[in-house]
């Protein structure tokens, strides 16, 4: 605080030297200088998170005039929180073009088009190497200052930035500051990320499970759950800009290339990531201090590539990696046996993605210290019984093991198991007897109800800590309604998503109704899917307004139900998808909730599909259906052949898809006349301007509508007024055999960027003048 206060005072009072050694005297003088004056103060690269220090530093600033501003740059979001920032701006990486401009400015002092042609191509490659980091572009540009020899530029292109001398490159010391300020436990977690290849995208849960297996999240730090501590660590690294959200998938994280290099620097000799395929060349790089090893999976990995790692006696991590799961990878059986025989101290062992793994050697039981076993995306069929002796296991990953039929018979002995991720294991026949002994289990992707009473729903009773997403399948195997009640799903408070699946049709309609009645989840569940249900009606609890956190509901293939549940009473339901309900002919008032004055108050997306017998959609109260869905943004009605209904324009509607619905019509011809309606059943309006309540529509798809003749009324066809939604960005017309021409009104759609037309065999005319100016596709 003293140093910064003195620096600010010296900047404000350049005409007067300040040699005070007392903070109070400094701040009194600074307050006098700022009093009544409007100022802009920039504090660059601030790290201090101490609230009391900030309060002390900011005391003189209150004397300034109204409108004074303080701008702070930082690499840690906690700094902004400490300072109670009014607003924040997250700076993104520079584009490759901007990096190129910075590079050229600091190297040749010229604009890009003025540099020699021979340098342009290599300059562009160097700019891409910077990966959007201004500091890298500036530093590399400085190294090339005044140099126009192609060899100098190619040298920089092919040199690892971290190999450059520190007196010529300030990237290394700058980034080391970020690492220096990490707490000790976070330094270890960050160094572990050096095992990830550059550009590797990872989920929060993935890295947390690895940290946990390595013992980095032991409860000695706080006495909290390891998973909660791991989430806090991930968010801390993200807030410090060491992790950044993927631009492709915001549920994943990625590290900038230079941050990845920083992690490798921090990791030292305990970590090694092998990226080439010639293992022999790497033997000299290893010492007995190596503990964690990863490598890029090759198409065929055999003894020659991996035998050197067996010389490392205390290896804890064996982690094959790949940037994507596309393409097949194979691991030699002899190599697998070699690894199991020579690496007994492993804590993390992964075979993910090796498609020739159909079974495991019994030697897997030798890995007594193993905590995490990853067999995801292999073709394993049966887990060996020797796994039951791995008493330290806390994570088994079996995702996308579509050939897996059986788990270990005595899996219940693995009492430390916390995570069994087994989603998409479609061949799994049942859960083993004694599965309910896994009382520490937090994550379970899929529970399969077996035909044997010992593998039934009752085993879920003791799994009280389950969290996240759970799928219960083969519910047709339930023999006793009491089993469903004993599962006690309503007590599992941490379940966020529940999928209830019947895999085969049942004739025990009343029995299935009773089973579903007993499978009521906890009221805090957020997503619920019911598929293949053979009952004739839904239980009362399904529309209970006490499910105040339910945001997504899917009802799929419940073909024997004759009516829909009263889900209009769910206060925060945002997405409702209903499909394959062959028994429903009328969607009536019960759908909205008979006692509900404002049905579906939060609904944003509504989808009906494959409702082959659905004929009538009764309005809720006065007005044409569905007038009251004020927040609805997406409406999709597909393959509902018998439905006869008028679709009203909605104020928030932005995406509309009507496909294969022969009798659905629209109330506004400005949107479309009619979709597959019977002849002469057009709906006309006298207004010449587009109603305000459909101006927000930005996506329109019309498919398989042979009776559609025009997008606007005949008298308006040749006008250029905005009868169509003026915000329309996407228009698709598919198999509309009756459509003969497109209206001049298309010219008014200044936002239309994409238009697709398929199978409109009668179309002979486009607008006479031109197509919309912004149209790209």
Image (cartoon, grey):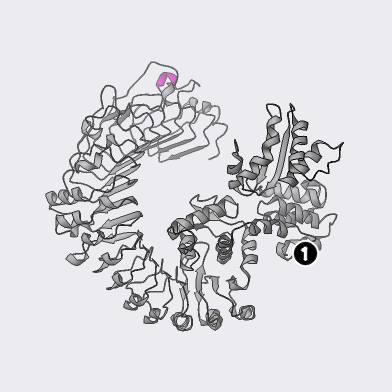
Which residue is nearer to you in this view: 659 or 343?
Answer: 343
Q: Which residues are magenta?
A: 709-729
- Do we see residue 244 in this rendering? no
Left or right: 412 as drawn, with respect to 583 = right
User: According to the image, label 1 marks what residue?
Assistant: 165
Asked if residue 724 is among those painted magenta in the image, a careful observer would answer yes
Q: Pick the quarter of the image with the N terminus.
A: top right
As drawn, the residue found furthest toward the top would be 686
In this picture, is 473 found above or below 62? below
Please provide percent x and percent y for residue 681. Answer: 28, 25
> Residue drawn at (68%, 41%), measured in percent from left and top?
57
The image quarter in which residue 167 lies = bottom right
Which residue is nearer to you in this view: 69 or 678?
Answer: 69
Label 1 crowd bin: few (<14), some (14–19), many (20+), radius 10 Å = few
> Residue drawn at (65%, 56%), measured in percent from left and top?
178
- Do we see residue 428 in this rendering? yes
């Amino acid at each position: 605080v003293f140093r910064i206060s003195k620096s600010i005072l010296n900047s404000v009072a350049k005409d007067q030297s300040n040699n005070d050694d007392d903070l109070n005297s400094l701040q009194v003088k600074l307050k006098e200088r700022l009093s009544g004056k409007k100022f802009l103060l920039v504090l660059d690269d601030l790290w201090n998170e101490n609230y009391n220090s900030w309060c002390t530093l900011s005391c003189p600033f209150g004397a300034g005039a109204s409108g004074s501003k303080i701008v702070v740059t930082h690499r840690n979001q906690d700094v902004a929180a400490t300072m109670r920032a009014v607003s924040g701006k997250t700076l993104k990486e520079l584009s490759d073009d901007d990096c190129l401009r910075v590079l050229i400015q600091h190297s040749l002092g010229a604009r890009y088009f003025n540099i020699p042609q021979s340098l342009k191509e290599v300059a562009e490659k160097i700019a891409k190497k910077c990966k959007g980091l201004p500091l890298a572009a500036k530093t590399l540009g400085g190294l090339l200052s005044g140099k126009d020899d192609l060899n100098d530029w190619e040298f920089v292109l092919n040199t690892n930035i971290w190999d450059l001398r520190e007196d010529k490159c300030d990237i290394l010391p700058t980034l080391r500051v970020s690492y220096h300020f990490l707490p000790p436990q976070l330094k270890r977690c960050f160094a572990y990320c050096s095992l990830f290849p550059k550009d590797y995208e990872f989920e929060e849960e993935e890295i947390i499970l690895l940290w946990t297996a390595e013992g980095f999240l032991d409860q000695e730090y706080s006495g909290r759950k390891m998973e909660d501590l791991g989430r806090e660590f991930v968010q801390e690294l993200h807030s410090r800009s060491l992790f950044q959200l993927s631009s492709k998938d915001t549920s994943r994280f990625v590290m900038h290339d230079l941050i990845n290099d920083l992690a490798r620097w921090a990791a030292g000799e305990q970590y090694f990531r092998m990226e080439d395929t010639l293992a022999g060349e790497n033997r000299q790089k290893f010492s007995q201090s190596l503990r964690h090893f990863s490598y890029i999976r090759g198409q065929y990995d055999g003894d020659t590539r991996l035998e050197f790692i067996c010389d490392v006696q205390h290896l804890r991590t064996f982690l094959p990696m790949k940037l994507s799961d596309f393409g097949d990878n194979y691991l030699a059986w002899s190599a697998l046996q070699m690894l199991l025989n020579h690496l007994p101290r492993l804590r993390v062992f992964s075979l993910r993605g090796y498609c020739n793994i159909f079974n495991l050697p019994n030697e897997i039981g030798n890995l007594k210290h193993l905590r995490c076993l990853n067999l995801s995306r292999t073709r394993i069929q049966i887990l060996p019984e020797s796994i039951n002796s791995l008493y330290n296991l806390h994570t088994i990953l079996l995702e996308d093991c579509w050939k897996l039929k059986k788990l270990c018979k005595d899996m219940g002995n693995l009492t430390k198991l916390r995570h069994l991720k087994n989603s998409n294991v479609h061949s799994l026949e049942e859960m083993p007897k004694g599965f309910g002994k896994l009382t520490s289990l937090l994550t379970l992707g899929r529970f399969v109800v077996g035909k044997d009473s010992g593998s039934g729903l009752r085993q879920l009773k003791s799994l009280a800590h389950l969290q996240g997403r759970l799928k219960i399948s083969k519910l047709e195997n339930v023999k006793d309604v009491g089993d469903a009640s004993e599962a006690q799903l309503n007590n599992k408070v941490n379940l966020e998503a529940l999928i209830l699946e019947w895999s085969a049709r049942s004739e025990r309609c009343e029995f299935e109704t009773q089973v579903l009645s007993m499978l009521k989840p906890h009221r805090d569940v957020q997503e619920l899917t019911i598929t293949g249900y053979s009952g004739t009606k839904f239980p009362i609890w399904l529309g209970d307004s006490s499910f105040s956190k339910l945001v997504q509901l899917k009802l799929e293939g419940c073909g024997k139900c004759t009516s829909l549940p009263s889900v209009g009473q769910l206060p925060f339901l945002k997405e409702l998808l209903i499909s394959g309900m062959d028994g429903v002919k009328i969607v009536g008032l019960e759908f909205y909730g008979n006692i509900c004055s404002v049905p579906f108050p939060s609904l944003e997306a509504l989808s009906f599909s494959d409702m082959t017998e659905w004929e009538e959609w009764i309005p809720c109260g006065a007005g044409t259906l569905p007038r009251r869905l004020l927040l609805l943004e997406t409406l999709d009605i597909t393959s509902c052949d018998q439905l006869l209904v008028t679709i009203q324009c909605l104020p928030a509607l932005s995406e509309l898809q009507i496909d294969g619905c022969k009798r659905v019509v629209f109330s506004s011809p400005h949107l479309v006349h009619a979709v597959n309606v019977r002849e002469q059943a057009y709906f006309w309006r006298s207004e010449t301007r587009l109603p305000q309540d459909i101006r927000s529509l930005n996506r329109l798809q019309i498919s398989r509508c042979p009776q559609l003749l025009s997008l606007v009324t005949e008298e308006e066809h040749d006008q250029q007024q905005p009868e169509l939604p003026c915000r329309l960005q996407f228009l698709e017309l598919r198999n509309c055999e009756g459509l003969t021409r497109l209206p001049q009104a298309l010219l008014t759609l200044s936002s239309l960027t994409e238009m697709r037309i398929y199978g409109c065999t009668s179309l002979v005319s486009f607008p006479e003048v031109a197509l919309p100016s912004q149209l790209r596709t």
